[in-house]
Image (cartoon, rainbow, N blue to C red):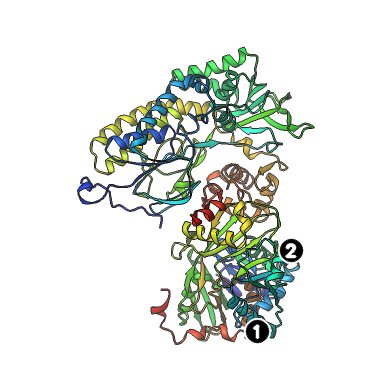
Amino acid sequence: MHHASRKWHGNTDWCRRMKPPSIVIVGAGPAGIRAAETIIQAGYRPTVVDEGDQCGGQIYRQPPSGIRRSPKALYGFEAQKASNLHESFASILDAIDYRPASTVWDASENKLCVLSESGTKDVHWDRLILATGAMDRVIPFKGWTQPGVFTLGGSQVALKGQACAIGECPVFVGTGPLLYLVAYQYLLAGVRPKAVLDTSPPKAQRRAIVGLMRGGRTFLKGLLYIAQLKRAGVRIASGIRPLAANIGEDGSVSNFSWLDHSGEMRSAICDSIAVGFGLRSETQLADLCGVPFAYDKGQRQWLPAQDSAGRAEDIEGIYFAGDGAGVKGADAAELLGRRAAHALLLDLGHAESGRLLANINRRIQRMSTFRHALDRVAFPFPHRLAAAIDDATILCRCEGVAAGELRRIGKELGATEVNRAKAFCRVGMGRCQGRVCGEIAAEVLAECLDVSIEKVGRIRGQAPVKPISMRAFAEASKS
Amino acid sequence: MTVADVAIVGGGIAGCSAALHLRQRGASVVLLERKSCGSEASGVNYGGVRQQGRHPAELPLARRSRALWSKLESLVGTDCEFSVSGHLKLARSDSEYEELNTYAAHAETHGLSLKLIPAEQIRRTYPWLSNDVVGGSLCAEDGHANPRLVAPAVMCAARHCGADVCERVTVTRVEHRNGTFVTTLSDGQHVQSRGLINAAGAWAFHISAAFGEPVPEDVMAPNMCVTEPIPHFIWPNLGVCGGDIYIRQIERGNVIFGGGEGIADRDAIRSYPQSAVTATAIRAAVSLVPDLANTQVIRTWSGIEGVMPDGLPVVGRSRTTPGLVHTFGFSGHGFQLGLGVGAVASELVLDGGTDTEIDELSIGRFDQLDVAASGNA
């Protein structure tokens, strides 16, 4: 179990001897699409399994049929990239085995368990490209579980996928480039944000400026978002510390309060709050396949170990592409998708992919200075904020576990590791399986035990990756 | 060199309970656990506190253990979510109902009272059960508890009473020299004791073999599932004749169920649920309680449990080595039995005997077996 075979390795004339290898790509965002395209060009027919109803991933998500908004309105500056990607995918549809609206809920020895409306099916793989993307990082504050509080990503999905806003006067809180981008997208859609509140100190952004300049157009766009928001009269502040989402008479958010950079308490009336502190890779499938993980100090998260071409360490036949194994952004994701595909093709004996790999890696390298300045200097994950959340604040919303309870378990019951803490107080045990709260629990536990974050470990991946409907299984057996 | 009256190898429920009971008698105790107490079978099982359906050879031990479950809160300071919900074993054919009848008569001789429930009464009392059910047998004093909490709670209580509990230590060697056990740890430390309790779960056969008592201990990994919380409606702990599915719902709403086996890798100390087994268990759960179709499974898990060829544990004194007591191979029954086993082990090691009837669980029953051919190693 959990060990992919080596049977295709270096085998150039497979077609004469046996059937072609089964190549499966999980995810149809920018990384997955570019990977599929590259695989097809080499003459294979990959299977593409995607949770979305349509391709595009989170960043280039498409609205459901019936909702018509122009690419320009949906994606702003990225409209051309989005259209290119959607068109690319449309042009390869005949050349792939496409499984939309399908969730991979378990993965093991050369097999994925895929749940769709028609039930669960096993999909065999000889080579697997994981382009599973990323999700919001959320740092809890008082009231974050109340109606009206959304993640930044969720707020963007509402806009792109459903053509609706989270409210009429939203406050945007957190840090990272997405904070300004989503606020700007709301502004474009006719919803003026009440405030954009960044926890990163202003001096961090100034310190990052040299590296950020390397981002060229991307950096200029960022400046433009901020300028436009300011011009529209949106209150922008950095170096803030979130205090609370306060609830009004209707049971929904009515006000947000925070400490400004000088420690002064401020508040704003609002009807919704979008929160996000950067992105975290979705790594569960790699975990279930048995790929070893290493702690990435820069991104401050556990990531599957991979070589310089995106090959998984220890498990033959698995490749990583896009944000699913380290967050690098949408532009890099397209390159990383191609890189993973070329690494795979090289392993199948396609020598020309080796040269292309080096070329792609050079281009990825050029992006990394900007990315480093963006993630680590300008908008680092504010882990101290996470570690310092109030005892009374709910940390794990699925199970209703407050931070103080986790600290008590750590100190009194000697839970020195997050899985042990989970066993004792249910943190990370609910519907999200720790995808949201796991890393915060680790920060809180490490701080209260006064050990390094690596020491307390990470919540082990357990199937199902996402909740699975029991009806889907029962009905599948009937048909 | 640590010196104690008794060394215990294995921090599952049985080992932890033995430590607590030995301390209550004033004996000095060192408990050695390779991971954290309750990491394997004791901590990751279904959580059934069930006497109904136990093999007659286990019933006296199950009865003894059940009495301790009632005292759990006073023993360890927390109830570990123990709920006396009753255990309802269901028949899906007339012959199965007949089996339940026969068993109930036998259980009565051990003082265990079971109530047979015919089909029409099942429909009235448990309207959410499938129409496939033709009858059931209720053991009112059975129930369920949270397995993640029990072994650690008993360990904490034992430690509070003065037991020397060492977690994350690996035993590399056990010897008996001049009436004294010498247990060697991977860091080179030694524990010297007059008594030794082998409570090493799926790995206990190494220890019994070291004292000239090889046994065919195999492993199993229960395939467990849990749903998101839903309104509480399944109050008894449910089982079926045949054992293909077992279901309980905790007060906060999650439904826990199991059926079939995952994969146990005893050497790597890792276990995994199997997706195909999970799928089968989901279907079985929905076919027994159709309303479960409306919920979602949020997690699956497994753990490693020792299994003996006859499905019964080994509980008793060693026949080769005075002072050595074996308690292992619980074959899926250890959660309910563990508390009682610890009490019995403390008596065996301090008094050389116990009033609880355990003769049929002796390690001697494997004397005639060709161990190399039939099990582990």
> Disc count in the image?
2
Q: Quadrant of residue A278?
A: top right
From what the image shows, is residue B342 above or below residue A392? below
- Pick whichever, A99 or A227, lies toward us: A99
Which-is-in-front pick, marks 1 and 2?
1
Question: Which residue is labeled 1 in the image?
Answer: B106
Residue B222 is situated, as x and y percent measured from the top left of the image, at 53, 64
Residue A343 is situated, as x and y percent measured from the top left of the image, at 31, 39
Q: Secondary structure at mark 2?
A: loop
Q: Are marks 1 and 2 on the same chain?
A: yes
Amino acid beneath label 2: Gly
The mark that comes first in sequence, 1 or 2, is 2
Q: Chain of mark 2?
A: B
Residue A463 is situated, as x and y percent measured from the top left of the image, at 51, 52
Q: How far, Cα to Cα, is label 1 from label 2?
A: 35 Å
Q: Quadrant of residue B11?
A: bottom right
Q: Chain of mark 1?
A: B
| Residue B193 shows up from this direction | yes
Kindly identify which numbered label has been placed on residue A303: none
* Image quarter (top left, top right, bottom left or bottom right) of the N terminus of chain A: bottom left
> Which residue is at a point 46% across and 74% down the rendered structure image?
B206
Amino acid beneath label 1: His
Question: Which residue is labeled 2 in the image?
Answer: B77
From what the image shows, is residue B109 above or below residue B16? below
- Pick whichever, B352 or B102, lies toward us: B102
